[in-house]
Protein backbone atom coordinates (compact mmCIF):
# COMPACT_ATOMS: atom_id res chain seq x y z
CA UNK A 1 0.00 0.00 0.00
CA UNK A 2 1.26 3.45 -0.71
CA UNK A 3 0.53 7.06 0.04
CA UNK A 4 -1.37 8.92 -2.68
CA UNK A 5 -2.39 12.57 -2.93
CA UNK A 6 -5.59 13.27 -4.82
CA UNK A 7 -7.74 16.22 -5.70
CA UNK A 8 -10.38 15.11 -3.15
CA UNK A 9 -7.81 14.85 -0.37
CA UNK A 10 -6.37 18.26 -1.23
CA UNK A 11 -9.87 19.74 -1.18
CA UNK A 12 -10.70 18.16 2.20
CA UNK A 13 -7.38 19.28 3.66
CA UNK A 14 -8.01 22.79 2.40
CA UNK A 15 -11.47 22.83 3.98
CA UNK A 16 -9.99 21.70 7.30
CA UNK A 17 -7.29 24.37 7.06
CA UNK A 18 -4.45 21.86 6.79
CA UNK A 19 -2.08 20.49 4.20
CA UNK A 20 -2.70 16.97 2.94
CA UNK A 21 0.04 15.42 5.12
CA UNK A 22 -2.31 13.36 7.33
CA UNK A 23 -4.43 12.03 4.48
CA UNK A 24 -3.64 8.78 2.74
CA UNK A 25 -4.98 6.68 -0.10
CA UNK A 26 -4.38 2.99 -0.28
CA UNK A 27 -3.95 0.68 -3.23
CA UNK A 28 -3.28 -3.03 -3.43
CA UNK A 29 -0.56 -2.50 -6.02
CA UNK A 30 1.88 0.40 -6.41
CA UNK A 31 1.08 0.75 -10.10
CA UNK A 32 -2.68 0.57 -9.67
CA UNK A 33 -4.61 3.82 -9.29
CA UNK A 34 -6.73 4.08 -6.15
CA UNK A 35 -10.34 5.16 -6.38
CA UNK A 36 -11.81 7.87 -4.15
CA UNK A 37 -13.52 5.30 -1.88
CA UNK A 38 -10.08 4.24 -0.63
CA UNK A 39 -9.03 7.64 0.70
CA UNK A 40 -8.68 7.68 4.50
CA UNK A 41 -7.94 10.29 7.16
CA UNK A 42 -6.97 9.97 10.81
CA UNK A 43 -8.73 12.75 12.73
CA UNK A 44 -8.18 13.80 16.36
CA UNK A 45 -11.04 15.38 18.32
CA UNK A 46 -11.52 17.74 21.27
CA UNK A 47 -12.88 14.93 23.46
CA UNK A 48 -9.75 12.79 23.01
CA UNK A 49 -11.20 10.40 20.43
CA UNK A 50 -9.41 9.61 17.19
CA UNK A 51 -11.30 8.42 14.13
CA UNK A 52 -10.15 6.66 11.00
CA UNK A 53 -12.53 8.06 8.38
CA UNK A 54 -13.30 7.11 4.78
CA UNK A 55 -12.87 10.49 3.08
CA UNK A 56 -15.16 9.67 0.16
CA UNK A 57 -18.14 8.68 2.32
CA UNK A 58 -17.37 10.36 5.64
CA UNK A 59 -18.03 7.06 7.40
CA UNK A 60 -16.02 6.10 10.47
CA UNK A 61 -13.93 3.00 9.84
CA UNK A 62 -12.41 2.76 13.33
CA UNK A 63 -12.56 4.64 16.62
CA UNK A 64 -9.54 4.94 18.91
CA UNK A 65 -10.33 5.89 22.50
CA UNK A 66 -7.77 6.65 25.21
CA UNK A 67 -6.97 10.33 25.61
CA UNK A 68 -8.99 12.32 28.16
CA UNK A 69 -8.48 15.75 26.56
CA UNK A 70 -8.14 17.12 23.03
CA UNK A 71 -5.74 15.43 20.62
CA UNK A 72 -2.91 17.79 19.70
CA UNK A 73 -0.64 15.65 17.50
CA UNK A 74 -0.68 12.55 15.31
CA UNK A 75 2.12 10.78 13.47
CA UNK A 76 1.28 7.95 11.08
CA UNK A 77 3.07 4.87 9.85
CA UNK A 78 0.39 4.06 7.30
CA UNK A 79 -1.34 1.62 7.14
CA UNK A 80 -0.28 -0.19 10.31
CA UNK A 81 0.26 2.18 13.23
CA UNK A 82 0.17 5.69 14.60
CA UNK A 83 1.26 7.66 17.65
CA UNK A 84 -0.89 10.39 19.19
CA UNK A 85 -0.45 12.97 21.92
CA UNK A 86 -2.97 15.11 23.76
CA UNK A 87 -3.52 18.08 26.03
CA UNK A 88 -3.78 15.69 29.00
CA UNK A 89 -0.07 14.86 28.54
CA UNK A 90 -0.68 11.28 27.40
CA UNK A 91 0.95 9.55 24.44
CA UNK A 92 -0.62 6.50 22.79
CA UNK A 93 0.73 3.99 20.27
CA UNK A 94 -2.13 2.70 18.08
CA UNK A 95 -2.53 -0.40 15.95
CA UNK A 96 -4.55 0.88 12.98
CA UNK A 97 -5.45 -2.62 11.84
CA UNK A 98 -7.21 -3.86 15.00
CA UNK A 99 -7.89 -0.55 16.78
CA UNK A 100 -5.92 -1.39 19.93
CA UNK A 101 -3.77 1.16 21.71
CA UNK A 102 -1.11 1.28 24.42
CA UNK A 103 -0.50 4.31 26.62
CA UNK A 104 3.22 5.01 26.81
CA UNK A 105 4.70 5.07 30.31
CA UNK A 106 5.92 8.55 31.29
CA UNK A 107 9.19 9.11 33.18
CA UNK A 108 9.05 8.81 36.97
CA UNK A 109 8.02 11.99 38.79
CA UNK A 110 7.21 13.66 35.48
CA UNK A 111 4.29 16.07 35.55
CA UNK A 112 2.06 15.54 32.52
CA UNK A 113 1.10 18.73 30.72
CA UNK A 114 -0.16 19.55 27.27
CA UNK A 115 1.97 18.04 24.51
CA UNK A 116 2.32 20.38 21.53
CA UNK A 117 4.65 18.50 19.19
CA UNK A 118 5.26 14.89 18.18
CA UNK A 119 7.50 13.21 15.64
CA UNK A 120 8.05 9.47 15.26
CA UNK A 121 10.88 7.66 13.54
CA UNK A 122 9.48 4.42 12.16
CA UNK A 123 12.89 2.96 11.25
CA UNK A 124 14.60 0.18 13.20
CA UNK A 125 15.05 2.49 16.21
CA UNK A 126 11.25 3.02 16.56
CA UNK A 127 11.45 6.20 18.61
CA UNK A 128 9.16 9.18 19.07
CA UNK A 129 9.85 12.58 20.58
CA UNK A 130 7.30 14.90 22.14
CA UNK A 131 7.52 18.49 23.32
CA UNK A 132 5.26 19.89 26.03
CA UNK A 133 4.14 23.25 27.41
CA UNK A 134 6.80 23.16 30.13
CA UNK A 135 9.53 23.16 27.49
CA UNK A 136 10.61 19.54 27.98
CA UNK A 137 11.15 16.97 25.28
CA UNK A 138 10.61 13.28 25.98
CA UNK A 139 12.10 10.51 23.84
CA UNK A 140 9.81 7.47 23.75
CA UNK A 141 10.64 3.89 22.76
CA UNK A 142 7.79 2.57 20.59
CA UNK A 143 8.84 -1.04 21.17
CA UNK A 144 8.91 -0.99 25.00
CA UNK A 145 6.29 1.81 25.26
CA UNK A 146 8.39 3.62 27.87
CA UNK A 147 10.15 6.97 28.05
CA UNK A 148 13.87 6.67 27.36
CA UNK A 149 14.93 10.13 28.48
CA UNK A 150 13.85 13.70 29.12
CA UNK A 151 15.67 16.57 27.40
Image (cartoon, helix red, strand yellow):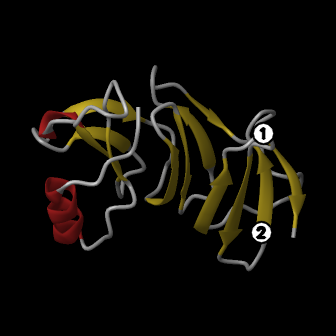
Please give the count of numbered marks on the rendered protein.
2
Camera-nearest label, 2 or 1: 1
Q: Which quadrant of the view contains residue 60?
A: top left
Q: Which mark is residue 124?
A: 1
How packed is label 1: few (under 14 Cα within 10 Å), some, or many (20 or more)?
Answer: few
Q: Which quadrant of the view contains residue 94?
A: top right
Question: Height in image: 96 above or below 98?
Answer: below
Tell me which label, 2 or 1, sits earlier in the chain. Answer: 1
Q: Residue at x 63, y 49 (%)?
A: 91
Residue 117 is situated, as x and y percent measured from the top left of the image, at 60, 68
Residue 123 is situated, as x and y percent measured from the top left of the image, at 72, 44
SS assignment at label 1:
loop
How packed is label 2: few (under 14 Cα within 10 Å), some, or many (20 or more)?
Answer: some
Mark 2 to mark 1: distance in Å?
Answer: 21 Å
Q: Residue at x 34, y 54 (%)?
A: 45
Asked if residue 87 lies left or right of residue 34, the reply is right
Query: In front: 138, or 32?
Result: 32
Q: Residue at x 80, y 57 (%)?
A: 139
Q: What residue sits right under mark 2 in the picture?
A: 137
Amino acid sequence: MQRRNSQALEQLASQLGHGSEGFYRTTSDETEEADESQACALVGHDDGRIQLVDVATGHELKLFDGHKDYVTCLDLHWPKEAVSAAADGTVFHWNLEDGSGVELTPPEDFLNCCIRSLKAEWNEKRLAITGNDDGYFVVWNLTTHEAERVL
